[in-house]
Image: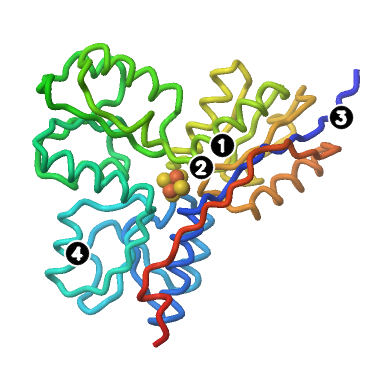
Amino acid sequence: MNTTPTVLLANPRGFCAGVDRAIEIVERAIERFGAPIYVRHEIVHNRHVVETLRARGAIFVEELDEVPDGAVVVFSAHGVAQAIHERARARGLTVLDATCPLVTKVHHEVQRLHRQGYDIVMIGHRGHPEVEGTMGQVPDRIHLVETEEDVARLTLDPERCAYVTQTTLSVDDARHIIERLTARYPRILGPKKDDICYATQNRQDAVKQLAAQCDLVLVIGSPNSSNSNRLREVAAALGIPAHLIEDETALTAETIRNARRIGLTAGASAPEELVRRVLARLQELGAAEIAELPGVAENVRFTLPKTLTEAT
Ligand code: SF4
């Protein structure tokens, strides 16, 4: 039996347009305003990205109280609650908002539904900053649903209710929850399908295609990255052993023992540089023949805040 493993790369993988934009905002803010620039929460959930920006002069904080008066603060790609915007305004801080425009779109939807008197369901993961930010767009009448079971506990106005979703959910899990919601509340309003973003959808489709051809799947991403965790789960749900790895240092001969076709992908916050390093490590461990699967081309680009693009 040929035991030299081959590697298949998922396509698309890695950075999405929202992550690209968020990182560029921090980089340009440092150029324009000079270090240090404060960033509330990890700009994107990737340790390597955070360390690189920290080395350039970004200071990461969890709370606005940690940002000194007069400083420049960047809000992370996950978005923030209205109360955080208000506090920053009240303190006169210079704010650069790196919230992904696809998250902002959900914020606007929640505000509109609330104004129109709807009870709103947010489908997402408790404690994730995107969920806190989206739920924090309105003062009340928004309910978190994490699982199908949670739907049974809801007490919504059946005539005036709506749902939104976190952008990085498992497409399949979200579908099941939405089916449960519409069975219980047939008149519930929602987006066409869900608010799962193009990047999450494409990466999950690609990892399904990958897992169908591999006997081991490696997902590069940090443990707190929602979309990276979902990629691992999608592969595992297809019965393929799947590991989430931060970088190449997590790999040993044992990790890939008995694997003949190793599938490799990366979450939306994981840089391509880490893919190259993991590939090099796999080659050190004996992998040969690296091939990339075909996949959909992504041409999404988001504009930067005007403050950073206007001439000084
Ligand atoms: S994963 Fe989707 S919602 Fe999140 S930053 Fe990327 S494009 Fe935006």
Residue that label 3 marks? 4
Q: Which mark is residue 203?
A: 1
Count of marks placed on residues: 4
Q: Residues within 10 Å of mark 1 (few under 14, many from 20)?
A: many
Query: Looking at numbered disc 3 in the image, what kind of residue is underneath it?
Result: Thr
Q: Residues within 10 Å of mark 3 (few under 14, many from 20)?
A: some
Foreground of the two, 67 or 130:
130
Query: Looking at numbered disc 2 in the image, what kind of residue is underneath it?
Result: Ala
Left or right: where 220 falls relative to 95? right
| Eye-nearest disc, 3 or 1 | 1
SS class, disc 4: helix
Q: CA distance from mark 3 to mark 1?
A: 27 Å
Do the CB atoms of the residues marked 1 and 2 lie less than 8 Å apart? yes
Residue that label 2 marks? 199
Q: Residue at x 75, y 39 (%)?
A: 292
Query: Looking at the image, which residue sits at the far right?
Result: 1
Q: CA distance from mark 4 to mark 3?
A: 54 Å
